[in-house]
Image (tube, coloured by chain):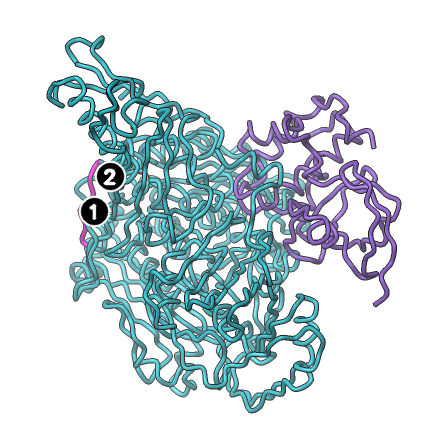
Amino acid sequence: MTLKYIGKDITRPDATGKITGRVQFLDDIKLPGLLHAAILRPDCAHGRILSIDTAEAEKLPGVVKVVTGKGCEMVYGDNIRDLTPIAVDKVNFIGQPVVGVIAETLAEAKAAVKKIKVEYEPLPVYTDARDALKKDAVLIHENSGEFWHLPGIEPIGGTNIANRYTVKKGDVEKGFAEADEILEGEFNYPFGSCSAIEPHGSIAWFHEDKTIEVWSSSICPFIIREEVARVYGLPICDVRVHIPELGGCFGYKSDITVEQTIAYLASQVPGRPVKWVATRKEDFLSTLIGHGIRTRIKIGAKKDGTLTALKTEILHSTGASADTGVHVLIASTHNSTGTYEFPNCFLDGYSVYTNTPPVGAFRGYGHQESHLAMERMIDILARKLKLDPFDLREKNYLGPGKVTALGETLHTTNGNVRKCVEIVRRAVFSAPKAKAEDENYYYGRGFAALMKSPKGAPFSSKSCYLKFNRDGSVCINMGGAEVGQGLRNVVRMVAAEALKIAPERIRVYTEIDTQFSPWEWQTIGSMFTTQGGRAVVRAAEKAIAELKKTAGIVLRTEVDRLDYDGDYVFVKSDPTIRVPVPELGRGYTFDDGVTVGDVVHTTADARLPIQSNPDENGQGRMGITYTFGAQACEVRIEKKTGKVIIDHFASSFDVGRVINPVQIRGQVAGGVMMGVGAALHEELKFDAEGKALNPMFRRYRFPTIKDAPGRQTIEFVETPGEIGPFGARGIGEHPVVGVAPAVLNAVYDAIGIDFYEIPLSPEKILEALEKK
Amino acid sequence: MKKIKLDITVNGVKHSLKVDPNLRLLDLLREELDLTGTKEGCGIGECGACTVILDGKAVNSCLILAGQCAGREIVTIEGLSDGEKLHPLQQAFLDHGAVQCGFCTPGMILSAAALLHANPAPTEDEIRVAISGNLCRCTGYTQIVEAVQAAAGKDKGDWWLQI
């Protein structure tokens, strides 16, 4: 297939507005009569609210309303309705909203918050699923078994278990009986923060005509619209949600979180808009956090390296609500096979309520956590079996004809892990290691293979509205959220290719507004290029058919005799008989004024082609859009300090088709940096009382340019997929998935010590070296 | 609170204002002058999203009071291009894919601009030091460094560098 635009470095359409500071983010929005909100958070992570004294706060200048949860009966959630917009009679985590103050200025709202007094009766605090699971543990939600939830989610009433998800494939006991070697390990991927540089925020406005308008720095306008409409008893059409420019997401601006809180506050001051933007501390603790996953793993293998059985137990400290975390657990559980085919599996996952901020999506969505376990275990197993780790992996890779834990058979169109492996092997392992150590450093190299599955829903569509203008230029509107990943450029380039029109003549949307934007479930799971691109191609094909239909009337011929080249619709056998496309965009008008044909504007959508709920074995269809990749690195460990320095990081993914080389390179470079942050630096820490120890960039150890790998090798394999536009698959999350195990495997190679948890701080390395 | 008189030059335009003594420079720019290209990411000087150029030096505008800027000259991202022609750094950010979400971008560009102003041909290490106070979650910094390298030496004395 010769492509004209796909695969070229075409500058993204939103870049100029961003480099000139002209684009509008949420906090840049000003509205008439705008009020500001500040929120009191508890100083106790688990406790009953005994009293709230707001008298002094209410007297302060500028204060319009002080709102508590007294009498609030609203519950919400997209998967499990275990959320309330504001604490009602008890607090369950340190970042929970307890009292909201609405004032004329932000400074006045903040000053009033300081005057509020709340008394709590403390309850036992659990910051780790292991403690919340103990038999005598207090229930964080006493009525957890009664929450509404989606089918396939199984809360266990009377415990802190919000969901148990189990996958059974084959006969795991038989598999272990066949094994010559059985290996067990336990790994920990602690809490982290997505930490986009733009903090999350929202504006809500209850209008006099009983409609509600919301602005949010969210990637889920349609979920917000539906949930807000539901809790306020409005038809969905009466809630309008705007999404301005988004300053990064990486997961935590998904689902519906702070929007319900701000809507609840705004509902108390109808007629005036209320704005709230998280402080950095609130962004760490009051939206969604990531990970908190412990993986216990047991692998059985034969002497020759054939894997026979896998048992995993995934314990997820999912936080004070499980609505957003429950699918992270599901993804982590069924992807705990990594890139390998195990004939026999028992994969057991638990979402457990804890007194920590709710866990939600984090770039990688459960994959990096269980890949840390699997890719480390494979290296350790290879050592036990005295096999080369590459050979051991090679024997067991998933690929065409192989069956995943979910029971899905893979095809050539899912991509080729072996080609990715070859690329990173060549980049990092082509020559023997130059040296094992010198005066100052130990040297090591590590590898990890990876698989990323989608995480969809039966209704996870993306839609496209495409219209031709009278000059032949095209406007495209979609509901996909641009968070920086470059989705708008993907839309434009795919449309250009499908319509055979230069990208400069295609204008894509700059904001989402549920009043105008075509419906989209939510922009998650690295699925936009695949599904959104498919919707664009479908809309383009419909538009071309429409142009041909009108041209057929004009040229008095049948449509199947016609062809289209972006400029003209013409007769295949004689291209001189033709109509210019601009003359067809609004129907064709003859010289005498008679007009035939229709306005050329089309809609199309695309969902995951096959998606089903889990069956009794936890198996089902994920939509067969798996993607494979491989990552490897060269590290140095400073003897004096224990610091790990990544000199070279190599990544390769089979993305089916590279849409834009500069952009995809940026996705990978940034994703690897995020993975490096998790592997070596980042951890959101809570003390035994559930109080956060480091909710700020520096103490959280947010990666700066000083932490970036010395260099990155980034290459792609292009085995076309069957669903995405021109064979393309997703890439957004994949670059983080194999980083931590690749780094920890390299650390073993350097110093001969196995680590099972991250972040791998210099102190941990020095301590381990001393013990050795 | 009694307001104080403030004469300040922003992007070459002189302003005479009365402001609260505790008003941050960041709020002056965003709220009083509607220059919302300057962003707030943390409010405590850790992320660099609010970077502006004050008398030729990159500073965090969240840590400076507006009153401290009396008689001084400030350049924000809005002052870097003239509405038609982009600054060489901005062009380089476009060409090298150094922009993703765009929230850190104004501050990042201004830190780099202050560097190039003082040192038109910096080494890679000098570039890394100059932007080490600007956090970016999207890019992994690689393409940002490439963009600054590409822009180095291309500054032909645009008006804002004369200040």
For chain B, the rendered hue is purple
Query: Measured from the top left, where is residue A29 in percent x and y?
Result: 58, 53
Q: In whole angstroms, how far apart are the C-alphas of marks 1 and 2?
A: 8 Å
Query: Measured from the top left, where is residue B117 in percent x and y?
Result: 78, 30
Query: Measured from the top left, where is residue A304 in percent x and y?
Result: 25, 46
Q: Are marks 1 and 2 in contact (CB under 8 Å)?
A: yes
Quarter of the image holding residue A772? bottom right
Work out whether residue A681 can be spotted. no
Magenta span covers which residues? Answer: A407-412
Q: Which residue is the site of mark 1?
A: A609
Residue A682 position (above or below residue A423)? below
Locate residue A361 relative to residue B149 in the image: left or right. left
A51 or A562: which is nearer to us? A562
Locate residue A64 relative to residue A176 in the image: left or right. right
Whether residue A411 appears in magenta in the rendering, the answer is: yes
Chain of the residue under the numbered disc 2 shown in the image: A
For chain A, the rendered hue is cyan
Q: Which quadrant is home to the N terminus of chain A?
A: top left
User: Amino acid under label 1?
Assistant: Pro
Locate residue A21 relative to residue B59 in the image: left or right. left
Label disc, if present, on residue A648 of the rendered structure = none
**Residue at left 35%, top 23%?**
A501
User: Amino acid under label 2?
Assistant: Ile
Label disc, if present, on residue A723 of the rendered structure = 2
Residue B28 position (above or below residue A281)? above
A519 or A642: which is nearer to us? A519
